Image (tube, rainbow, N blue to C red):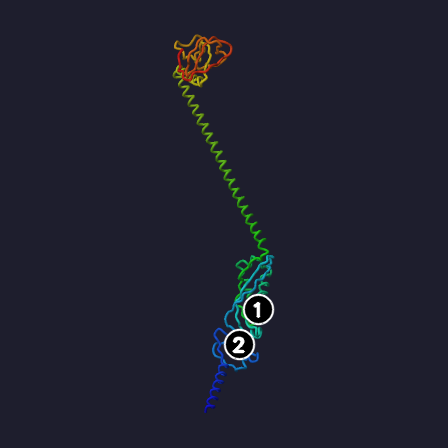
Amino acid sequence: MRQSATAIMVALGVALVLLLSSVFVVDEREKALVLQFGQIKQVREEPGLGFKIPFIQDVVKYPDVILSLDTETIEVTPSDDRRLVVDAFARYRIADVVRFRQAVGVGGIATAQDRLSGILQAQIGEVLGADQVTSDTILSADRRELMNRIRDGAQARAESLGLDVVDVRLKQTSLPAQNLDATFARMRSEREREAADERARGNEAAQRVRATADRTVVETLSEAERDAQVTRGESDAEANRVFAEAYGADPEFFQFYRSMQAYQAALRGSNSTMVLTPDNDFFNYFFDGGRPEGSSEDPAAAQPGSAENAAATPVDEAAGADGVTVTLGEPASGAAIAGEADPAAQPATP
């Protein structure tokens, strides 16, 4: 009995091991192949339980999701001969698991990514280096069309691997390190040229504004000077008219007024000593008893200091207006003005 029980337990254990070894589970994110001595015997693409022959058949599972691949940085030369450094990434999935197994063998996903990376790099160089594709095109919005062309070309070549290339995108497009300095220098020179053009246009506009302002100033000053000349002319005409009317109204008073103006203009300053003859008409209104014999009618017409009215030998002296000392003497040749008048002296009548 004891031996039979042991045998039953052993049989049950063996049966359980065989059952567990013959059952496998396929997840909804996986695809499975059942291999027998390296040959594909069964393909399971639907999730659920599967069975195989224990110890004879093996199960290989592959992901049934979209995978990502980042390519290495490559250098391309567009048609304008401006070298660019480009790196890209791709999204792919295993479309045909049988062809995938036959293409990559036991290498699996790692081998497939290596081969797909080579396909992508070759396709990127071919598309970006084609005719009529410039660096400006690569850096513009037209790069989407270029990426679609890269994807379609890679898809056609990846079918032999059982892969479906879903999308390809260019991550970074830049200049090589050895070209950066030259590019920056060219950009700097372009900006300096634009700045020089802006400054030249600004200077031209400033010169136009200054010329307009200068012309306006000259025109304004000319008009102001013209108006001033007209005003002065009109004022002089009015003054002459007033003088003429005053002279016509009272000629004697007008002569007296003109004589006072002549006194004020001649007897000014601290040195106003004059030597005159007694019959000089300049100081005609200084005498109480009237003009000396032989004097003219208009005292303001006689000018002091002339050679005909000067005297060399003084005979009489009196303090004139504004601190002026007036010396009267006999006529002599030449005129003499000497001495210094007292500024505090008051006018006196001789």
Left or right relative to 236: residue 71: right
Residue 165: image quadrant is bottom right
Quadrant of the snapshot with the N terminus: bottom left
Which comes before the other along the chain, label 2 or label 1? 2
Left or right relative to 259: residue 32: right
Indicate the position of residue 314 as horizontal and vertical percent values.
46, 9
Q: Which residue is mark 1?
A: 114
| 268 shown above or below 187 | above
Quadrant of the snapshot with the C terminus: top left
Q: Is residue 339 visible?
A: yes
Residue 349: image quadrant is top left
| 255 shown above or below 30 | above
Mark 1 residue type: Asp
Q: Residue furthest bottom?
A: 1
- Number of residues whose C-alpha sits closer than 10 Å to that of mark 1, classed few (under 14), some (14–19) or many (20 or more): few
| 235 shown above or below 303 | below
Q: CA distance from mark 2 to mark 1?
A: 20 Å
Indicate the position of residue 10 as horizontal and vertical percent values.
48, 86
- Of helix, strand and loop, which one carries label 1? helix
Q: Residue furthest front?
A: 2
The residue shown at (54%, 49%) is 191
Residue 119: image quadrant is bottom right
Q: Are circles 2 and 1 on residues that touch, CB within 8 Å?
A: no
Indicate the position of residue 103 as horizontal and vertical percent values.
58, 73
- Of helix, strand and loop, which one carries label 2? strand
Q: Which residue is mark 2?
A: 60
Indicate the position of residue 226 as horizontal and vertical percent values.
47, 29
Q: Is residue 298 visible?
A: no
Mark 2 residue type: Val
